Image: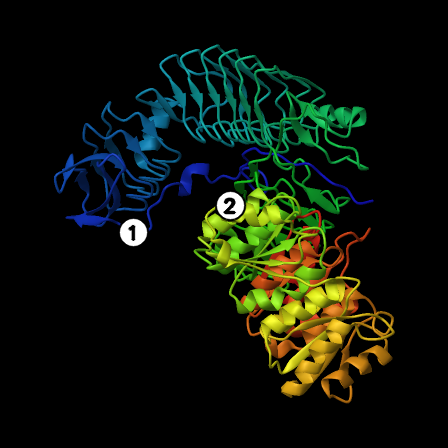
Amino acid sequence: MKKRIISAFLAFVFLLGTASLLPQDAFTDIPAFADSASGDFSYRICDDDTAAIMKYNGSKEKITIPSYIDGIKVTVVDTFAFMNSTSIKSVVIPDGVTEIGVYAFSGCKNLSNISIPKSVTLIKSSAFSGTKWLEEQRNKDPMVVVNGILVDGHKCSGDITIPSTVTCIGGWAFDYCNGITSVTIPSSVADISDGAFNSCKGLKKVTIAKGTANIGNWAFTMCENLESINIPDSVSVIGEAAFEECRKLTSITIPKSVRTIGERAFFLCTGLKNITIPSSVTSIGGRAFLNTPWLSDRRKENPFVVVNSILIDAHDYKGDSAIPKTVKTIADCAFYADYSLTEITVPDWVSEIPKECFGSCANVERVVIPSSVKSIGYHSFFGCTGLKSIIVPKTVTSIKEKSLGYYHEINADSDKKVDGFVIIGEKGTAAETYAKENQMTFVEYSRLAGAGRYATAAEISKKAFPSKADTVILAYSMNYADALAGVPLAVRENAPILLTNTKSLDSTALAEIKRLKASKVIILGGEGVIGKQVETELVQSGIKAANIKRIAGKNRFSTAATIAQQLNTKPTDVFFVYGNNFADALSVSTVAASKNAPIVYLTTNGSLHPDTAAYLAQLKKAGSVKNAYVIGGTSVISDDMANKAANALGLAKATRVAGTDRFATCTAVNDTFKTSFTSNELCAATGMDFPDALAGGVYAAKNKAPLFLINGKAAKPALTDKQKAYLKANGASSITVFGGTSVVPDIYIEKIAEYSV
């Protein structure tokens, strides 16, 4: 059963697998190259205009890091700066340095003497690993503390108490210390950094005094025997995977001070049955409680697991019921790998589609993204292998890596897209940029639509005539007869077709006439369809009465003949269409306009209308007509009627261009006259009504593009085999739609794009 899923916003940081030995910050903010070099040191300029030592290029035993380098104050010893410099035995770090980066002195196996000033307040993971100095400090005290930072505790075992001099437990300080059984953390410790107690498999109990504000990412990951931990009412952040795979935890109370619970914070805590989550928590990361008994129990109660208005899980969602109105945001991965989903409709209150929200939903065939969305996060739809195309609105300004499409591995270093995925969007937007960067097919797309037929005609006019038009053609909005015959005339006059009603000039049309600075107006039809008051209002708006021209006859047949006379007295081609329906006239209007050829109305059987016969007699006398075409099948214009019309021109017969229905006829017209279309653009409109295609016919003809009619009212929208074959044979790199989604649904645009490439 097809589902429509409402998604929302949140941030999500994805890490494959469990925490590794490598510190999370090992490759953070590493510049691609040095800004400069001075003596033995390469350096870069920091954001605060101080210097960071990037690399030591010498081979001395004793080093004093300069306080200034090329006149710039040194504040950072960067990641990997001295790594594996085995010649170094002694280092003096000057006062003023505040940060020592990840692995800064790692592997300096002969380094035994280090002078670290009190100005250093941040020492990142494994900064001194593999040095003699660190080993000597361990021998003095199994907990190595520098300036209040507990740098290393790998020789600790049993029940340990962190000294009150410690303000921060450094990153990965105790990781894999399997001999530790309990830890008491004093109130002086503000931060338990990333990976601090990662994989301490013997750790059973943790006691944290009030004062700690942050439990870092992977802080207690894979402490598989941890049975008890208290989180004090001072912690505001529980980091990503902080307690992942702590399988013996059965109960935990989260205090009111906590605002954020990170991604996978309690993932795979397979014994965790009881969790107290206060209302203070406003952000919950993806899969925070996945594979816990607590979540399993919640799923049984409701397929939508909601905590503090955050939908954290919907993997047991079955059916078409809507997400509860109480939901304000949806956590990352809430629908991840949900194979039952076939369609995703993002609601219009969403501004960001978060990372991995719908990743690996392999059976999703369609995604609808509203204009409220500004960004699409990393891996949002990655692995949705059933999805062939997607329309990305112009409001989306950021699309993260591997958000759209589906990939296969080409080699160990790169992923490429599988051929066939199409991104549809406006030119110059993030959608086009993403498609180019990822070697994907991009189809340009724009929709010209307003709130109703009048506004849609005005929007088409703005696109076709962005600056000015001297002449405007006014047509009656509620009947096609006079207007459709006027499309070739509009193109010849280089004029848009605007719509109005009978009794007064439509305000939208008037505004567009003023924008265009038009000085001439041609009205199609008699005063019975566009009243005299419209002319009066045109004059009041500044159009001279002498510049207002009306083309009209006693009925649609005579009006069409009169328009044809005004259009071209010596045409080469003539198009015959059924006068009592608009469909075939719509189909051929663009072709007729491109050939400056008249559209002539016929009935199914009987005699030619007198005005039609008189006009055709004039053309016969002129002797210019070489080709006559009848558009539509014999059910609308019989062979007998077609022959009468052709004979009236002095021709033996008219060439019939028709299909099994109006859509097939339109396709046949486009295929027959494909040499008239020189652009790669395709214009789509509904074939179930006339106004949008009428106004759009002028735009299509100006741009040498075919008009492609679809049945937007079909219960199950689909293109016919003839339409698919036409698209495959002719293709389109650009699609312009006339009318809103109620008449031309986006699903048609997706299918047109898919079959065009």
Along the line of sight, the residue nearer the viewer: 157 or 587: 587
Looking at the image, residue 596 sits to the left or right of residue 323; the answer is left
Q: Is residue 339 above or below residue 167?
A: below
Figure quadrant of the C terminus: bottom right
Figure quadrant of the N terminus: top right
Which of pointers 2 and 1 indicates the residue nearer the eye? 2
Total marks placed: 2
- Marker disc for residue 33: 1
Q: Secondary structure at mark 1?
A: loop
**Picture coordinates of residue 198 (x, y %)?**
52, 30
Q: Residue at x 29, y 51 (%)?
A: 33
Amino acid under disc 1: Phe
Q: Is residue 422 above or below residue 229?
A: below
Badge 1: how crowded within 10 Å, few (<14), some, or many (20+)? few
Q: Residue at x 29, y 43 (%)?
A: 81
Q: Secondary structure at mark 2?
A: helix
**Picture coordinates of residue 646 (x, y %)?**
76, 83
**Picture coordinates of residue 720 (x, y %)?**
78, 65
Q: Are marks 2 and 1 in contact (CB under 8 Å)?
A: no
Residue 487 seen in render: yes
- Marker disc for residue 326: none
Amino acid under disc 2: Ala
- Marker disc for residue 511: 2
Along the line of sight, the residue nearer the viewer: 116 or 182: 116
Along the line of sight, the residue nearer the viewer: 78 or 376: 376
In three-dimensional space, the C-alpha distance between marks 2 and 1, rounded to whole angstroms, equals 57 Å
Question: Which mark is first along the chain, 1 or 2?
Answer: 1
Badge 2: how crowded within 10 Å, few (<14), some, or many (20+)? few
**Picture coordinates of residue 754 (x, y %)?**
66, 62
